[in-house]
Amino acid sequence: MKRTAITLVIALNVICAGYISAQDRSVSYTNVFSDFTRNAAYTASSENLNILLDSKLMTANLDGQYESLVFGVHTMLGDNNAAGLKIMADNQGALRNVNMELNYAKKFRLAENHFLTFGTNVGFLQTTINQSALTNYVDLSDPTLSNGYFNQLRLTAGAGALYNYKKTLEVGFSMPMLVTGNEKTNASMIANASYAYKKSAESKWKFIPQVVYYNLTQRSMLDAGLKTSWNDFVSLSAAYRTNNSLLTSLTVQTKSVCIGYAFNYNTGPVSNLYMGTNELLLMVSLGNRGRKQMEVNDRNLPAVEDKLQEVKKSLTDISNSADKMSAEEIKKKLKSSNADLQKIMKDYKTDNVESLKTQIQELNVLIDEIEKKLKTKTGN
């Protein structure tokens, strides 16, 4: 059997599963829980050591269903650098891909509350053919099945960028498949934007409009939807994807564990064959374990001072508004500001810089004033 005939059989099998070919390793990038996977800049999105596992399986009435598994780990290295590892394994009909990459990201402070992060990913892609998944019409003794066309190990690389304003506006852009072996440069790109809105600073509800645009190897599409979060604990989201599918997800998150479930429902003409995909996320956050206190020097002193100024602003706002706030609101905000201050003191050796020691003393005076106002309000 000629290579073209085998390719046709494999392509038909993969198309039935909703994807195109072994050369297209983009399928895992369209997962709902996929920020870190598709854009290396998200490696610096959390100061904790995060370990995640994301599994997706097609729900369909046909053979050769698509399934994927993503494993990732990432953490900050110091104040502005981050590193991570991701492993993406997927079965697309008779084709198997395993992509292992190292991520690196560096964060830059452009101005107060404005941050820009650049990331890069480099690794290897192993492509093999699953002969047991081929139809009975394929001659398994054909040497074409075992040649380098279907069984290869190739270098992969990509890059991404992320802009953040406070904790509200987020804009990302990535080209995660720039390099795949000796193939020509892949111009596939993914862009995303979101904005977190709260009616008031005290509100526990957060509304986050989100859009993601994919211009991948064989297709382009857009996700547009809304995520609703309560107390940063429970989140619900719904979005429409322009390939005739509806994305829904539910996540429950604590400080150390996040569990998420998503269902991609196919609304297109072949929904009776291909209902959609189920996706499950498990993420564990181990905190910033293993990170030692950083020495404060001329280079990072401005960043530490900015962090302390943010705490001072929060405490000043609490003090000025204490008369209009309930005791519970004061306690909650004071606890949050205290935690921010303690984190700075834990991350940096502030006791070896006189100016920082003075700022921290001023913050402690502010905290004492707020605690006195709280005692007056509660009568204790």
Image (cartoon, grey):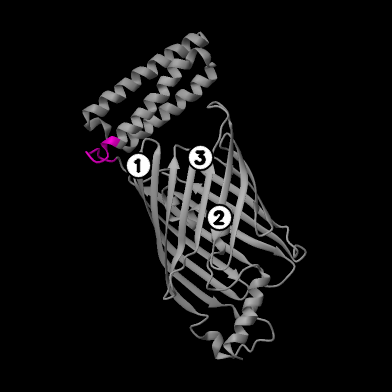
Marks 1 and 2, how far apart at CA: 26 Å
Q: Residues within 10 Å of mark 2 (few under 14, many from 20)?
A: some
What x and y, as percent, mark residue 357?
A: 26, 26
For the residue labelled by badge 3, is the local secondary structure a helix, a strand or a loop? Answer: loop
Q: Is residue 27 above or below residue 310?
A: below
Which residue is tagged 3? 255
What x and y, as percent, mark residue 358?
A: 26, 23
What x and y, as percent, mark residue 110?
A: 35, 41
Question: Which three-letter amino acid code belongs to the residue tagged 1?
Answer: Arg
Question: Which three-letter amino acid code belongs to the residue tagged 3?
Answer: Lys
Residue 213 numbered mark, or none: 2
Quadrant location of the N terminus? Answer: bottom right
Q: Is residue 344 above or below residue 367?
A: below
For the residue labelled by badge 1, is the local secondary structure a helix, a strand or a loop? Answer: strand
Residue 109 numbered mark, or none: 1
Q: Is residue 150 above or below residue 373?
A: below
Question: Which three-letter amino acid code belongs to the residue tagged 2?
Answer: Tyr
Name which residue lies at 49% across and 57% down. Answer: 37
